[in-house]
Amino acid sequence: MKTGGQLIVDALEANGTDRIYCVPGESYLAVLDALHDSPIRTIVCRQEGGAAMMADCHGRLTGKPGICFVTRGPGATNASAGIHIAMQDSIPVILFIGQVASHAKQREAFQEVDYVRFFGDIAKWVVEIDDAARIPEFVTRAFAVATSGRPGPVVISLPEDMLTSLAEAPAALPHTPVETRPGEAELDALETLLNKAKRPFVILGGTRWDAAAVARMRTIAEAWSLPVGCSFRRQMLFDHLHPNYAGDVGIGINPKLATAIKQADLVLLIGGRMGEMPSSDYTLLKSPYPDQSLVHVHADAGELGRVYRPTLAINASPSAFVEAVAGRKPAATPVWADETPKLHAAYLDWSTPPESGPGAVQMGPIMNYLEKMLPDDAILTNGAGNYATWVHRFHRSRRFATQAAPTSGSMGYGTPAAVAAKELFPERDVIAFAGDGCFLMNGQEFATAVQYDLPIIVVVVNNGIYGTIRMHQEREYPGRVVATDLKNPDFAALARAYGGHGETVEKTADFAPAFERARASGKPSIVEIRLDPEAITPTRTMTQIRDRS
Ligand SMILES: Cc1ncc(C[n+]2csc(CCOP(=O)(O)OP(=O)(O)O)c2C)c(N)n1
Ligand SMILES: [Mg+2]
């Protein structure tokens, strides 16, 4: 006989869990007690939103479910920020919530929430376990659901009395990974479409990639001379310095790239959903009927034909798909072969940062410096804000598992993600980028970095405004500024107060030595850049945006 808490931990161990992210609560003390004697590493966080985002980053970089434990009510509602990210981004996560005891349910007891209803639309599956004897079944099933087809978050509610009850249960068996491969018929049809095409274009996106799949994709692009773009915030799927790389299919897309995609006669969308942001509001690919022939490859049959009617639908995970296609070669040099390097040249041009802009700090040379000094395997994280444009446009991503950024555009992701990334990969440089607004959402997880001795570097791009919203405000309602000015703390002093290292950069030339000192400190660091709010985009100032409207 074992407690429910012990059965939960046993089932996690059986499924290969090595670490969990949590904020404790009295509702799941029995699980915490079982963790006391488990080899699973328990990482205690400062807010459940941060804990859930760490679990998301874990799932994003490893492909294995990130595990998060939170308490009922406010713990669960805080965690929902990370669950929504995992849902939109197709990331495997399992969130366990301590629930009120069975005798108190349905009375709106203390912190009671109905999780099936609350998470219904933002999780892949939500379940409450009422019988401790069924814990092995439900936990193993949660792993299967989170990782199969289109991965996503699973939420499991654990009534307190169920966790303390004693039950006899079969030992949990690990889940069985589910693979979906294309058949010969699909591969033949794809080859026929490629042989007929004059101007094909490949867009990579989604999850269920790994380093081997990324390497295979590169070989396929080379064999067929295909131009390749990466969907919004999926830049780690193709080497940006490869001659077939055509650019980031994201927000503020290179107009030349947008034209190439619109004028393509065949789009091969591998793994992605081509949502509102990467599709430039469904104009690059029109929904429901794209102008181009569309080959859509996705691991979830439900995704195929949901938004776009594909010419050819291939129900396969990206990794299984590229493995199957790698054996196919064109009979002769494709007719588009000479065009592909031109798209790469346009990308190189587009991703060369400007040397100058308003104010004493120039982000262009700072990005140039970081590009030269950071190793290819450095992990870059960020949340949402105009500062992220500098990273997405000018960072030339080289390798898989080097990027953690929410395609859902959630602020406050960068710092907790960096904590999780550095804990997973202590030997790699981990740099979080945040705006002044973004950092103060979940910036408290900097304390977690200090607690676990994780020397992340957070680059806080401080322009004193919620810049993205100010930009939209000035465009739509010029001069009528409401709720976008911010009075900020001294971020470097804040880093020191937490026990970390802090730097303030007020001139471009100060950045490199400040960054070097932060790196050499061996401590979690904040490098605050005081950016002129006029420098709102790499190409246009705030005044130009206001004057144009
Ligand atoms: C959680 C969340 N709240 C609000 C928003 C809306 N929003 C998008 S960007 C932005 C401002 C970001 O400000 P900051 O981090 O300072 O970056 P900046 O744009 O100034 O570079 C806001 C409020 C969002 N995307 N996510
Ligand atoms: Mg800002």
Image (spheres, helix red, strand yellow):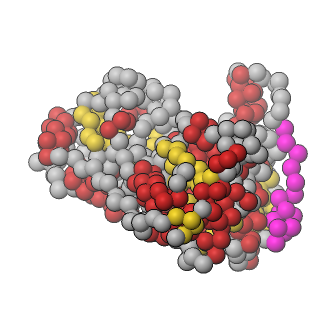
Residue 249 location (% of width, % of height): 46, 40
Q: Nearer the viewer, residue 549 or 185?
A: 185
Image point 31% across, 42% down: which residue? 297
The mark tally for this picture is: 0
Residue 402 location (% of width, % of height): 51, 61
Side of 253 where 191 appears, left or right: left
Which corner quadrant of the image does residue 480 belong to?
Answer: top right
In magenta stretch: residue 487? yes
Residue 487 showing in the rendered view: yes
Residue 355 showing in the rendered view: no
Side of 61 where 177 appears, left or right: left
Image point 71% across, 25% down: which residue? 475
Write the start and end of the magenta stretch as one range.
485-499
Side of 188 where 392 appears, left or right: right
Q: Is residue 486 above or below residue 402?
A: above
Q: Is residue 176 above or below residue 37?
A: above
Q: Nearer the viewer, residue 333 or 11?
A: 11
Residue 235 location (% of width, % of height): 47, 51
Q: Nearer the viewer, residue 411 or 122?
A: 122
- The residue lying furthest to the left in this view is 331
Which corner quadrant of the image does residue 115 belong to?
Answer: top right
Image point 74% across, 63% down: which residue? 446
Image point 51% across, 49% down: which residue? 154
Q: Quadrant of the C terminus?
A: top right
Residue 521 location (% of width, % of height): 74, 77
In magenta stretch: residue 48? no
